[in-house]
Image (cartoon, grey):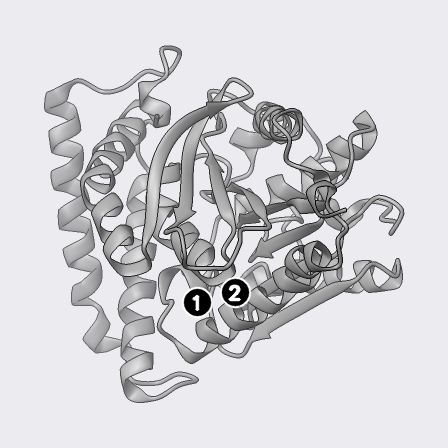
Amino acid sequence: MVMADRPEVQTATPAVAALTMVGLGQNLLTGLARIPFVQPWRGPGNIIDNLGQSVTRQTIRSFMGYSLGLPIEEFRSMEQVIDGLCRVVMPPFVKQLDGVTITKEEIGGVPGLWCRPKPGTHDRVYGTILYLHGGGYIGTSPMMYAAFASAIAKQTGCHIFIADYRMAPEFPFPAGVLDAASVYEALLEQGVEAENLIVAGDSGGGGLAASLVSHLHASGVDMPAALLLFSPETDLELDQPSVSDNARFDILPWNVPTSPYLQGIAPGDPLVSTVNAALSPDWFPPTFVTSGGKEMFRDGIRELVENLRAAQIEVHAIEARGMFHVFPILMPWLDASRQVFAELDEFVDDHVRSRAHLGLFGDEK
């Protein structure tokens, strides 16, 4: 399911939706035409990598700039078309590339997708990951994240459920958190042990993943084994220097929208900005955090990492020099992205698979 498929969500007429897609194509072409004039060969890597970053950066900027200027019903229709294309392309692509099978399922009343590695890829699957996709709390869909989730599944051997949680502005905070909590608790009820369950997310989904941990703590629910955050949006006040200093280097729009999600909630509220939460190792799990040195959220992520360390919570942080927002998702072939996947595998092994080897799960006792 994509947001446009929900009965409460309005979409544009077919004619308007078609014009919207034409406008998107024109905007992308105009954006790409700018690339030769911005010295695309310059950057932190070799010429090929730098050119790839320039093309990726301009493409995503053009897409976001166009999308955020649309009426919400046109935005949802455009999202529906892109999701439909991904439904055709992604399942055979990830099966061929990563040996991962994609299936639909509803868990705790929330639809989503399972990404499961091919049997025999790993000796045994020890981990389950609840993945909350990014999109600034307002957009994208699970199928659009199938390639990244499948890459993680292949690397770690974990089964991954990408939750199709409700998004703003139709469903502002706390709808997404409540949906994520429903999935998490349903997984526990189905027999997945908390010590074997990881919560993950990127960008807005990373912020949602951190908010979920706070929500679970307040509800007295067992904490997950670990938390995986990729360029998380965990400081919605957006008042750090990197928000303006890195705007010209990042893929994000310079005016990152948060009001559709908050709708009256103070952006600094710890429930939505985990950077302001009173963290404790008694309830906050070991955390893996990756970010780019040139992304707008960099300073907020640095503060979160510092707060985790100050609270004596185990944290494994990677800040890749010269990289932009969610670079492992957009450019997984880069050396910096390969490093993230390698260290992620070690982190998951330390917090899930190694525990199973030590006989700490119920069926191993």
Could you say which disc has been placed on residue 331 in the image?
A: none
Q: Nearer the viewer, residue 201 or 90?
A: 90
Residue 305 against residue 21 in the figure, above or below = below
Read off the residue under disc 1: 248
Residue sitting at x 23%, y 52%: 93
Residue sitting at x 22%, y 60%: 31
Residue sitting at x 33%, y 58%: 98
Q: Secondary structure at mark 1?
A: loop
Q: Amino acid at mark 1?
A: Arg
Q: Position of residue 358 (x, y in %)?
A: 75, 59
Crowding near the residue tagged with mark 1, few <14, some 14–19, many ≥20 C-alpha atoms within 10 Å: some
Residue sitting at x 52%, y 70%: 340
Read off the residue under disc 2: 295
Answer with left or right where residue 154 lies relative to residue 193.
Answer: left
Give the quarter of the image for residue 274: top right
Q: Position of residue 270 (x, y in %)?
A: 77, 39
Residue 140 visible to the viewer: no
Answer with left or right where residue 219 lies relative to residue 186.
Answer: right
Crowding near the residue tagged with mark 2, few <14, some 14–19, many ≥20 C-alpha atoms within 10 Å: many
Q: Nearer the viewer, residue 260 or 99?
A: 99
Q: Nearer the viewer, residue 270 or 214?
A: 214
Q: Position of residue 268 (x, y in %)?
A: 73, 41
Answer with left or right where residue 147 lies relative to residue 213.
Answer: left
Q: Nearer the viewer, residue 57 or 94?
A: 94
Q: Amino acid at mark 2?
A: Glu
Give the quarter of the image for residue 330: bottom left
Q: Residue furthest top?
A: 7
Distance in Å between CA atoms under marks 2 and 1: 9 Å
Q: Secondary structure at mark 2?
A: loop
Answer with left or right where residue 321 lies relative to residue 307.
Answer: left
